[in-house]
Image (cartoon, grey):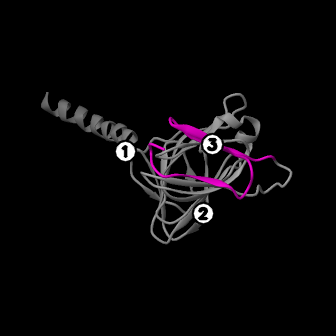
């Protein structure tokens, strides 16, 4: 009787280990949101509550990833809709939402700290209100644009720059619960000195 029990446990153990191994694997969205492109120094992507992976050119980026660069480092992330984010040294950004399916478009990111530049792609072109960039002190609404900025937990500076396509209309709206400002002329920007301004 004991011999049969040990035999059964011996057959069951590999199956249990296999199931445990499957559940221990990182879980990503069904489709990648984009790829890491230009990389200088060290940059990382980390899903919430999971292990960070070092970025190399071509590394897939997923919704729920937090992208982080180290000191003297930078990375460019190219989303599937051709939106480009360039993150400078000591910058951290989360990808809260990415969907490029027609009628369900959405790209929402959050810059926690650091310097950044982004060039909007097809999502903002087809449905401008579907792209938003959050900062600790404000929210950037997009209307087809090229933007540079710097942010931290207590303040932000956002500047509209010339679009890559000179024929494209470009503007942003920077807002929080205290008000908003529309910037529609390249070279102009706004500074939000704190969360109460």
Give the percent coordinates (x, y) of residue 116: 57, 58
Give the percent coordinates (x, y) of residue 174: 60, 43
Q: Which residues are magenta?
A: 169-197
Is 90 within the magenta?
no
Q: Earlier in the sequence, mark 3 or mark 1?
A: 1
Q: Is residue 30 in sight in this rendering?
A: no
What residue appears at the point 64 percent right and 55 percent down from the top-left corner?
A: 159
Which residue corresponds to mark 1? 49
Give the percent coordinates (x, y) of residue 79: 65, 49
Give the number of callouts.
3
| For residue 47, above or below residue 88 | above
Q: Secondary structure at mark 1?
A: loop
Label 3, label 1: how many angstroms apart (C-alpha)? 36 Å
**Eye-nearest disc, 3 or 1:** 3
Q: Secondary structure at mark 3?
A: strand
Q: Residue furthest right?
A: 167
Q: Residues within 10 Å of mark 2 (few under 14, many from 20)?
A: few
Which residue corresponds to mark 3? 181
Which residue corresponds to mark 2? 57
What residue appears at the point 78 percent right and 57 percent down from the top-left corner?
A: 164
Label 3, label 2: how many angstroms apart (C-alpha)? 37 Å
Instruction: Give 13 or 119, whichever is nearer the viewer.
Output: 119
What residue appears at the point 76 percent right and 57 percent down from the top-left corner?
A: 162
Q: Secondary structure at mark 2?
A: loop
Q: Earlier in the sequence, mark 1 or mark 2?
A: 1
Left or right relative to 25: residue 77: right
């Amino acid at each position: 009787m004991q011999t049969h029990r040990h035999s059964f446990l011996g057959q069951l153990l590999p199956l249990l280990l296999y199931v445990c191994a499957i559940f221990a694997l990182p879980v990503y969205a069904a489709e990648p949101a984009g790829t890491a492109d230009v990389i200088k120094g060290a940059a990382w992507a980390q899903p919430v509550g999971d292990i960070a992976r070092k970025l190399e050119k071509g590394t897939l980026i997923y919704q729920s990833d937090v992208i982080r660069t180290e000191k003297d480092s930078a990375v460019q992330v190219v989303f599937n809709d051709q939106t480009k984010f360039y993150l400078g040294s000591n910058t951290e950004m989360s990808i809260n939402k990415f969907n490029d399916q027609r009628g369900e478009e959405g790209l929402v990111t959050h810059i926690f700290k650091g310097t950044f530049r982004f060039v909007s792609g097809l999502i903002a072109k087809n449905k401008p209100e579907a792209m938003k960039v959050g900062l600790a002190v404000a929210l950037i609404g997009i209307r087809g644009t090229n933007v540079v900025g710097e942010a931290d937990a207590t303040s932000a500076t956002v500047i509209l720059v010339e679009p890559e396509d000179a024929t494209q209309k470009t503007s942003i709206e920077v807002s929080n619960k205290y008000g908003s400002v529309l910037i529609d002329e390249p070279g102009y920007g706004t500074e939000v000195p704190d969360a109460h301004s």
